[in-house]
Amino acid sequence: MPVIFVDDIKRSREFYQNIFSLEVEMDFGENIVFKDAFSIWQRSRAMSIIFDNINLDEKINNYRDIELYFETLDIESVWEKVRSSNLEIIHPIKEESWGQRVFRLYDPDKHIIEVAEPMSEVVIRFHKSRLSEETISIKTQMPIEIVRKIIPK
């Protein structure tokens, strides 16, 4: 899924909803997923998460305006393939504050590529670790109704 970095998330959301009638599937505040389309991410938040605030001024001046996002159920094997290549890695697998495990790298043209586990897997992992539905909802920033749909019965 393409992720576009934007300067003003509210303005961009209104633009895509009003002009193209895109439906918001998930709203995480600084990251919005449009149903069957793409996501927008508040640029400053994206940069601070991707680069852990390290040399952020330099990174902001040299980045591309798009991140390509891929999900995989087997993040470790994809990571090993990337790690054993000559690709430029931004960071190894890490767990984001919302619980998702991700790593990022550059493609040959310096576009940012994110590889992550699906959020449904995060919910299941948290459920298996005996977190309550409410805690999972808060941690993942996902509505409780969606958490309840994901958790196996």
Image (cartoon, rainbow, N blue to C red):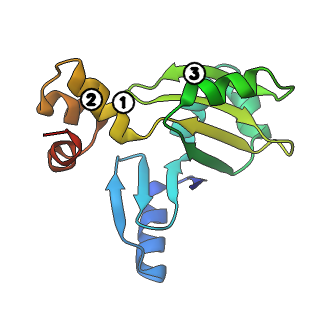
Position above or below: 48 against 64: above
Q: Amino acid at mark 1?
A: Trp
Q: Position of residue 65 (x, y in %)?
A: 69, 51
Quarter of the view holding residue 14 = bottom left
Q: Amino acid at mark 3?
A: Ile
Question: Which residue shows up at 71% across the image and 29% down it?
Answer: 57
Quarter of the view holding residue 18 = bottom left
Q: Which residue is mark 1?
A: 98
Question: Total marks drawn?
Answer: 3
Q: Earlier in the sequence, mark 2 or mark 1?
A: 1
Q: Position of residue 82 (x, y in %)?
A: 74, 28
Q: CA distance from mark 2 to mark 1?
A: 5 Å
Q: Which residue is mark 3?
A: 93
Q: Disc 2, disc 1: CB below 8 Å?
A: yes
Position above or below: 12 against 152: below
Q: Which residue is mark 2?
A: 139
Q: Earlier in the sequence, mark 3 or mark 1?
A: 3
Quarter of the view holding residue 87 = top right
Q: Amino acid at mark 2?
A: Lys
Q: Position of residue 85 (x, y in %)?
A: 83, 25
Q: Residues within 10 Å of mark 1 (few under 14, many from 20)?
A: some
Q: Residues within 10 Å of mark 2 (few under 14, many from 20)?
A: some
Question: Which residue shows up at 47% across the image and 73% down it?
Answer: 15
Q: CA distance from mark 2 to mark 3?
A: 19 Å
> Of the numbered discs in the image, which one, if any, rests on residue 45?
none
